[in-house]
Amino acid sequence: MVTIQELFDLDHTLAKDYLARFTYPWEALKGIKDFILALGPTLGEEYEEVSEHVWVHKTAKVFPSAYLGAPCIIGANTEVRHCAFIRGSALVGADCVVGNSVELKNVILFDHVQTPHYNYVGDSILGYYSHMGAGSITSNVKSDKQLVVVRDGAERVETGIKKFGAMLGDHVEVGCNAVCNPGTVIGRRSSVYPTSCVRGVVPADSIWKDDGTVVQRRA
């Protein structure tokens, strides 16, 4: 439940062909910057290069106090609200919300993703219609600075990378003030309770409770 095909519908991102090269989503993290630099000049007249290597769709709304660091792409009908800080290497899809005081770095946000209030999202991929509640963050570096390992029960998957936040599948809901620890992978249609401290793999169609218990979502 941790492969790209299991987590995401690739028809809802400009990164479809790029992501399809890989088996696991974290394999794409190292190349996001170069991918955006190559994609930007091909986007056509619907996008405007508002500064060097920063492309914004003409229907997007970027508030005056927002900072767009290069390289980045902001999709159609997306809102980048006051004091948002996009540090760079960010592909933000269509119909997204990047809210007040949100920070993005080295990320892919599929279409209809919402990071609306005080979120930090770094070295992460957020699937179609995923949502992060106010104050929820991705922690992208381990406290011991060692390489990140994805843990799925007794199984350990070595990623070989130091910076890896979270992979949120399509339609994932992360509650307010939750922390997704390095190497978190959350399957499609799963939810995380507010104030949770999440780590490892959360199966699809399940609920992570704030005491770490995981239960299957009822139909």
Image (cartoon, grey):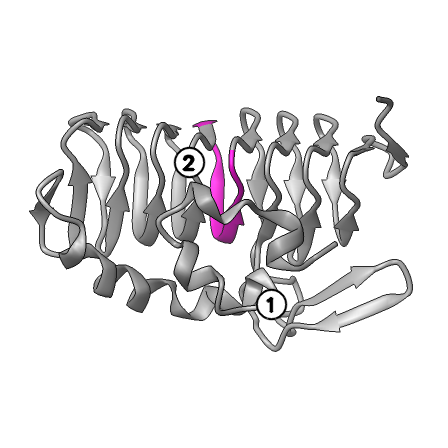
Q: Classify 10 Å Cα crowding around label 1: few (below 14), some (14-19), many (20 and above).
A: some
Residue at 89%, 58% (x, y): give it. Answer: 153
Q: Is residue 98 left or right of residue 195?
A: left
Residue 62's quadrant in the figure? top left
Magenta stretch, residue numbers: 116-128
Locate residue 151, reporting x and y percent: 79, 62
Provide residue 173's location: percent of width, then percent of height.
Answer: 64, 29
Residue at mark 1: 23
Q: CA distance from mark 2 to mark 1?
A: 21 Å
Check residue 111 in the rendering and tell me which mark sits there, or answer none: 2
| Most frequent secondary structure within the magenta stretch | strand
The residue sitting at 90% across, 36% down in the picture is 213
SS label for mark 2? loop
Residue most toward the top? 219
Sequence-wise first label, 2 or 1 = 1
Q: Nearer the viewer, residue 38 or 209?
A: 38
- Image quadrant holding the N terminus, namely bottom right
Q: Is residue 44 magenta?
A: no
Say left or right for 52 vs 142: left
Which amino acid type is shown beneath numbered disc 2? Asp
Picture coordinates of residue 142, whole percent (x, y): 64, 62
User: Front-most of 200 and 82?
Assistant: 200
Mark 1: which secondary structure?
Answer: loop
